[in-house]
Image (cartoon, rainbow, N blue to C red):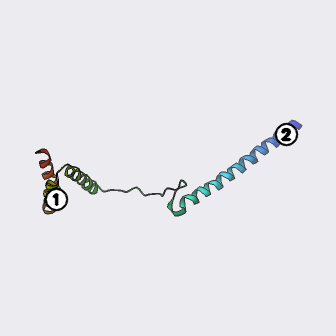
């Protein structure tokens, strides 16, 4: 009988150790949750940011704006001011077309 009691005692100690470990992880979880909720920062210290959600219309606008800026960048100052006047009068699409025509005519 003594070996059986020793085995039961060891199993009881292992079980108690696992319960203690589970409590430690549970309290660690609360510490991590509290750390992330402080001032909107994550445990690493960087602020959490919401991913921006863009509409299809806004994405088209950004693409058009990027094409306009990229084309305008390669022009000389006088050509650039001409394209900017077109943009003020007719809009970005017309200005982009004019800038592309000027850029390819060189």
- The residue carrying pointer 1 sits among few (fewer than 14), some (14 to 19) or many (20 or more) residues within 10 Å by Cα, namely some
Q: Could you tell me residue 68's position as x and y percent?
A: 21, 53
How many labels sit on residues? 2
Position of residue 43 measured from the top left corner of the image (x, y, whole percent):
55, 55
Q: Quadrant of residue 84?
A: bottom left
Between 25 and 72, the residue placed more toward the observer is 72
Q: For the residue carrying disc 2, how many other residues have a C-alpha within 10 Å: few (<14), some (14-19), or many (20+)?
A: few
Which residue extends farthest front? Answer: 77
Q: Residue furthest left?
A: 105
Residue 104 rendering spot, x and y as whole percentages: 13, 44
Which numbered circle lies on residue 6? 2
Disc 2 vs disc 1: which is toward the camera?
1
* Residue at position x 28%, y 54% in the image: 59
The residue carrying mark 1 is 84
Residue drawn at (47%, 57%) of the image: 48
**Quadrant occupied by the N terminus:** top right
């Amino acid at each position: 009988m003594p070996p059986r009691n020793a085995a039961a005692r060891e199993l009881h100690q292992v079980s108690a150790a696992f319960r203690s470990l589970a409590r430690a992880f549970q309290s660690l979880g609360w510490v991590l949750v509290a750390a992330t909720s402080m001032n909107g920062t994550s445990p690493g210290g960087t602020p959490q940011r919401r991913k921006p959600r863009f509409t299809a219309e806004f994405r088209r606008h950004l693409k058009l704006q990027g094409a306009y800026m990229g084309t305008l960048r390669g022009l000389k100052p006088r050509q650039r001011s001409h394209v900017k006047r077109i943009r003020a009068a007719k809009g970005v699409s017309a200005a982009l077309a004019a800038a592309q025509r000027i850029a390819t005519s060189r």
